[in-house]
Image: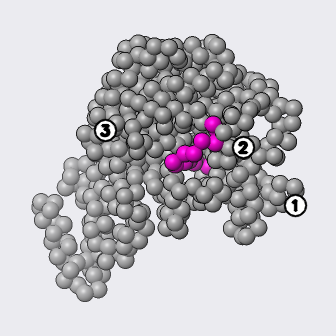
Amino acid sequence: MAFATTIGNLRQKQLNFPDSHEGLSLLKRFTRRTFARLFGSAALAPAALTNLATSAPAQTGHSPSARSFPQGFLWGSATASYQVEGAVNEDGRGPSIWDTFSHTPGKINNGDTGDVADDHYHRYKEDVQIMKALGLKTYRFSVAWPRVFPQGTGTPNPKGLDFYNRLVDELLAANIQPYCTLFHWDLPEALEDKGGWQSRDTSEAFATYAGYVAQHLSDRVKHFMTLNEMRSFVDIGYKDGRHAPGLKLPPAGVNQVRHHAVLAHGLGVQAIRAHAKPGTKVGLAENATACVPVIETPEHIAAAKKATREQNAGYLTAIMEGRYTDAYLAHAAADAPKFTPADMKAIGSPIDFVGLNIYTPSYIRADDSARGFATVPPPASFPHMMSNWLHVGPEALYWGPKLAAEVWNIKEIYITENGASSADVLTPDGHVYDSDRVMYLRNYLTQLHRAVSEGVPVRGYFLWSLLDNYEWADGYAYRFGIHYVDFKTQKRTPKLSAHFYHEVISRNGLA
């Protein structure tokens, strides 16, 4: 019997019963194995079952618009240059600190490097088609600074910029809006040799680079982010030494690096505004600590609001307020960064939107200390994804943007990263059933819906990540993509989470 005829008969039989019980009973008995016989593949059955379920909301009692997002909400995904591009020695690209660090024995899991990664540099057209099939409305990519300025400063490299011109054009042809991040950790090695982020000169070099890229891409790219996750590349790269450039500076040195990072952001904002086409919007993508009240009572909520400001004092608070908090400077004492009023004015340059990278919560409780709050560390039993640090706390995607909007009166927010690692296994018939990632995304997006339904100004969501990729010091051991990548053949395979996200985008919401 033809599949369409079978389903048609079942639906007709269902419609013939006012209470629909017999029809629903027949649908339930129409098992996955029955679908497999009709399709010739059991793997396709879940998608067909999903289509059936969504076609008859009245019978199931679930409205597809019950948890809809606002019209025009932007569903996207994100990647980063060193994590996906490969082609590290092509078309005049200079070396970055990650090229140097990844080739240093003992620094990266399994000795992995980003030399090839996802080969996105050569396969970007294929990847854009994957985005289009997924239904993405927008895509967040990063420009590799050493492609455009191989030495970090000086003469730009036209071939390096040409790649991003081609990528942007391909995205627009697929009706996908490009969102551009200007720095996602791949600092030119030539600048690191001169002090890197320990030097104020790097902040100024970044501004020159940012203005140049904005000048050449802003005719088509309307949203630019200056730096990605300053907290991560400063603390993990210059304090802990686990990421490039692998330094373990004393507190005063770390605080000065932190200051140069936020200064680079501020000078970058000014340079973009000076060189970009009219109508260009400027922001950043920061992994601000998402403070969550340990219990939703007035005293803990108030404590989480205080913590939002102080726990982000060295980064987002300084940017949004143009000053370091008294508590931050008092805590740093003699190790406080050296800065001028002109620095702080630049750092506080007005921005058009804030991007928040949110993965985990920081639970906050009220206490009687001078700060008025305390962090509640996760117990050993706290659930997490494959990455030990990635504790599962969906409410972070509610309280993170909500409190940021309240503390700093932000009018436009994007969740510029959210996603999860999983122990993804490719089955013999070529599928990945990452039900844990689907669980993670469903729960986090439910909390994001809670936020937007209450008027929190989140305009879009960028899932991390489109593809399995090079995960920094973890190499290729941890997979964050919703498409499985065989790094030997570069074959891309959509996971169960990709089908889930496609449904979310199609519905503009959750079932």
Point out the tag, 3 or 1, that comes first from the N-terminus.
3
Q: Position of residue 344 (x, y in %)?
A: 69, 38
Q: Which residue shows up at 12% across the image and 65% down it? A: 5
**Neighbours of disc 3 within 10 Å: few (<14), some (14-19), many (20+):** many
Asked if the residue at tag 2 contacts the one at tag 3, i.e. Cβ–Cβ closer than 8 Å, the answer is no
Furthest residue in direction bottom, as rendered: 18
- Given residues 86 and 72, the one toward you in this image is 72
The span from disc 3 to disc 2 (Cα, nearest Å) is 38 Å
Instruction: Identify the secondary structure beneath mark 3.
Output: helix
User: Residue 14 lies in what quarter of the image?
Assistant: bottom left
Confirm or deny contact between disc 3 and disc 1 (CB under 8 A).
no
CA distance separating discs 1 and 2: 26 Å
- Residue at image position (55%, 45%) is 351
- The residue carrying mark 3 is 171
Query: Which tag is nearer the camera, tag 3 or tag 2?
Result: 2
Q: Earlier in the sequence, mark 1 or mark 2?
A: 2
Mark 1 burial class by Cα count in 10 Å: few <14, some 14-19, many 20+:
few
The label number, if any, that marks residue 368 in the structure image: 1
Q: What kind of element bears circle 2?
A: loop
Magenta highlight range: 346-360
Amino acid on which the number 2 mark rests in the picture? Arg
Q: Residue at x 50, y 63 (%)?
A: 452
- Amino acid residing under circle 1: Asp
What's under tag 3, amino acid-wise?
Answer: Leu
Is residue 430 rendered magenta in the image?
no
Give the quarter of the figure containing the N terminus: bottom left
Answer above or below: position of 384 versus 207: below
Q: Which residue is mark 2?
A: 323
| Marks 3 and 1, how far apart at CA | 53 Å
Q: Is residue 424 above or below residue 204?
A: below
